[in-house]
């Protein structure tokens, strides 16, 4: 069901990256109450600039590495919940692309996202008296159709999509809804230079960038539209400046 972002409290993991920063700016155009940015990179000048965009919104930055143990994430979230009382939306956007770094890729792109999600369930789960909440996970079109030269990265994104689909189906139990936003190739430093798995394609970045791409602004505009459309189980494709909720064919059902 569509929502208004006015007066909402939003936590944005990786809100200072290429896609993240323009999406943060776009979010600030809506009159949120709080935007809490958690990121591994700290950039006070950018936070000051963000705060100036809309003085009605309180912008906070807290350093956060998604690979920390889940207990640390829970501690961090507790400080945020203690201060804000409620949090409406969690956006999980941390990602790295380097198929030489197998463990780090899985740790950041998948385990980190699963842990951050699991940690916030402590505060949101209706079975624990929580109010429920909304999770927006950044997947990728590679989660559906792999860039096969980076199978580790693509695999983590497929895992994000699959995990999020389960979260959406668990919403009646937990009270927490979820969907993915899946960007196509977007011009950020992430895709300018990266290693393929076992160097199967040394020119993978150049080859990828021969395909049609989109700007971070185009991606950000559609990102916030998808958040406002707020569809539990949504699989949003944000590709070449367009936004589409794709139908994922149901080939198999566990039946339980
Ligand atoms: N650029 C693309 O073409 C594209 C396409 C599909 C999906 N994505 C995904 O979008 C997201 C943003 O990517 P981007 O293109 O803006 O790249 P980027 O490199 O500009 O941003 C990556 C973000 O992740 C953060 N991050 C990395 N490791 C982290 C960690 N351990 N803990 C916390 N934060 C961490 C970075 O600080 C940064 O904010 C990623 O999840 C990426 O996989 C990007």
Image (cartoon, grey):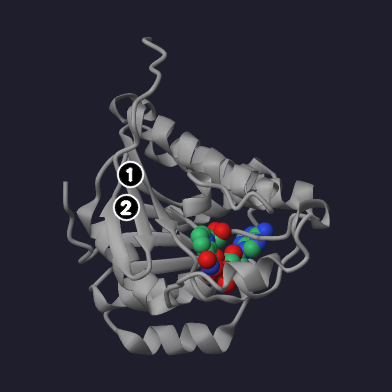
The residue to which callout 2 is attached is 88
In this rendering, is residue 19 above or below 169? below
Q: Which mark is residue 150?
A: none
Name the residue rendered at 39%, 28% in the picture.
Answer: 128
| Residue 8 seen | no
Camera-nearest residue between 215 and 174: 215
| Neighbours of disc 2 within 10 Å: few (<14), some (14-19), many (20+) | some
Q: Is residue 69 left or right of residue 48?
A: right
| Residue 197 seen | yes
Q: Quadrant of ligand 1?
A: bottom right
The residues bearing labels 1 and 2 have C-alpha atoms spaced at a distance of: 5 Å
Name the residue rendered at 65%, 48% in the picture.
Answer: 72
Camera-nearest residue between 89 and 26: 26
Q: Quadrant of residue 126?
A: top left
User: Of the residues under marks 1 and 2, which one precedes in the sequence?
Assistant: 2
Name the residue rendered at 30%, 45% in the picture.
Answer: 246
| Neighbours of disc 1 within 10 Å: few (<14), some (14-19), many (20+) | many
Name the residue rendered at 38%, 63% in the picture.
Answer: 239
Q: Which mark is residue 133?
A: 1
Q: Is residue 18 left or right of residue 233?
A: right
Residue 166: x percent and y percent? 42, 30
Q: Quadrant of residue 3?
A: bottom left
Camera-nearest residue between 246 and 108: 246
Q: Are marks 1 and 2 in contact (CB under 8 Å)?
A: yes
Instruction: Point out the image quarter for the C terminus.
Output: top left
Residue 184: x percent and y percent? 45, 62
Residue 86: x percent and y percent? 33, 52
């Amino acid at each position: 069901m569509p929502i208004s972002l006015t007066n909402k409290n939003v936590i944005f993991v990786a809100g200072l990256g290429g896609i993240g920063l323009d999406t943060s700016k776009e979010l600030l155009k809506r009159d949120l109450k709080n935007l809490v940015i958690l990121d591994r990179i700290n950039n006070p000048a950018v936070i000051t600039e963000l705060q100036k965009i809309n003085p009605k919104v309180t912008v906070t930055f807290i350093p956060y590495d998604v690979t920390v143990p889940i207990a640390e994430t829970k501690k961090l979230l507790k400080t945020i919940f203690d201060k804000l009382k409620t949090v409406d939306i969690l956006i999980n956007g941390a990602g790295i692309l380097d198929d030489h770094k197998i463990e780090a890729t899985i740790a950041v792109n998948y385990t980190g996202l699963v842990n951050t999600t699991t940690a916030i369930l402590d505060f949101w789960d209706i079975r624990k008296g929580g109010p429920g909440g909304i999770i927006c996970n950044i997947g990728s079109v590679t989660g559906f159709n792999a860039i096969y030269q980076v199978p580790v990265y693509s695999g983590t994104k497929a895992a994000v999509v699959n995990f999020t689909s389960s979260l959406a189906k668990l919403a009646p139990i937990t009270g927490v809804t979820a969907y993915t936003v899946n960007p196509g190739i977007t011009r950020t430093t992430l895709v300018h230079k990266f290693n393929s798995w076992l160097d199967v394609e040394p020119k993978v970045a150049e080859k990828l960038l021969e395909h049609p791409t989109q700007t971070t602004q185009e991606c950000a505009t559609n990102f916030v539209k998808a958040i406002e459309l707020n569809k539990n189980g949504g699989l949003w494709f944000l590709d070449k400046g367009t936004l589409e909720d794709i139908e994922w064919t149901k080939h198999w059902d566990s039946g339980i």
